[in-house]
Amino acid sequence: DVKVTQSSRYLVKRTGEKVFLECVQDMDHENMFWYRQDPGLGLRLIYFSYDVKMKEKGDIPEGYSVSREKKERFSLILESASTNQTSMYLCASRKAGGSGDEQFFGPGTRLTVL
Amino acid sequence: DQQVKQNSPSLSVQEGRISILNCDYTNSMFDYFLWYKKYPAEGPTFLISISSIKDKNEDGRFTVFLNKSAKHLSLHIVPSQPGDSAVYFCAASSTGNQFYFGTGTSLTVIP
C-alpha cells in the first residue's frame, strides 16, 4: 500500500520559533509538494520539488523554505513562525512525467502558532 | 487570482439521488483535471481524472464531464451514498508539475 507520511498530526509552536515539517514517501516518486489548506482558500502550493536537491516556488513561498536531500524525504521549514502560518499543511508526492498521474497526499499536519 | 473555482461551498443531497459538483477554470492551457475527496483529519485522495482531449470519463458511480469551451467541469455521483459525504476538490494542471486546486465543496448525503 502506497504511503505518504508526515512527522506530526498536530503541532503547537510559538511565534518566532523555527519549525520543521517532515514528509516521507515510499513510492520512489520524483515529485513532491507542500500545500497549505485554509478555509475558503482551498489548497495552495507553497513549494514543490521535481528531484533531489531541486525546488521550485509555488504560489505562496514567502516565510517558508524547503529541503530535499533524499528522494523520499521533503521538508518544509518555517524560519520564524508567525500566527498567520497557523494552518493545515499537506504533503504530496507524484510520479514524474506529464500531467497524467495523480498526487498522493499525506494525512496533514495541523500547525498552530501562538 | 484563483484559476480554479468551486462556487458552491456546500451541497446536500438525499441518499440514492444524483450529486453534481461543479468547477470552473480560467486558464485555457490546463490539459488535465482531477477530482479529489477529503474526509476530516485525512489527506485528499484521488477520485477521478480527465484529459482535455476527452469530454467524459466514467468510473463506477463517478463521472466527470469537461466542457472546454465553457471552461467548466462537473463531477456526477450516482447514486449518492452516505459514505460519499466529504469535501471534494477539483484540480487542474498544464505541466504536471504545478496543480491548481479549487476551494472545495462539502457534500452531505442525507440517509
Image (cartoon, coloured by chain):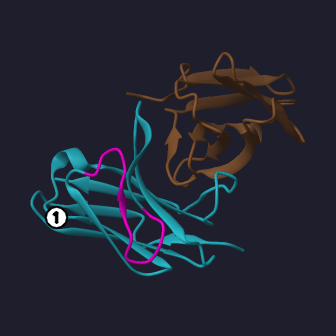
Seen at 66% across and 55% down, the residue is: A102
**In the image as oriented, which residue stretches furthest toward the right?**
B60
**In the image as oriented, which residue stretches furthest toward the top?**
B70
The percent coordinates of residue A34 (x first, y second) are 41, 58
Horizontal side, residue A101 vs residue B29: left or right: right
The percent coordinates of residue A103 (x first, y second) are 60, 57
Residue A111 visible in the current orientation: yes
| Chain coloured brown | B
The percent coordinates of residue A79 (x first, y second) are 16, 64
Q: Is residue A55 rendered magenta in the image?
A: yes
Q: Secondary structure at mark 1?
A: loop
Q: Is residue A4 rendered magenta in the image?
A: no
Residue B111 visible in the current orientation: no
Horizontal side, residue A52 vs residue A4: left or right: left
Which region is colored magenta?
A: A49-61
A42 lies above or below A61: above
* Mark 1 residue crowding within 10 angstroms, few (<14) / some (14–19) / many (20+): some
B104 lies above or below A86: above
Seen at 75% across and 44% down, the residue is: B48
Q: Quadrant of residue B59?
A: top right
Q: Quadrant of residue A44?
A: top left
Quarter of the image that includes the N terminus of chain A: bottom right
| Chain coloured cyan | A
Seen at 53% across and 19% down, the residue is: B7
**In the image as oriented, which residue stretches furthest toward the bottom?**
A70
Q: Nearer the viewer, residue A16 or B6?
A: B6
Horizontal side, residue B46 vs residue A80: left or right: right
The residue indicated by pointer 1 is A79
The percent coordinates of residue B34 (x first, y second) are 67, 42
Main SS, magenta residues: loop
Label 1 sits on what residue type? Answer: Glu
B108 lies above or below A50: above
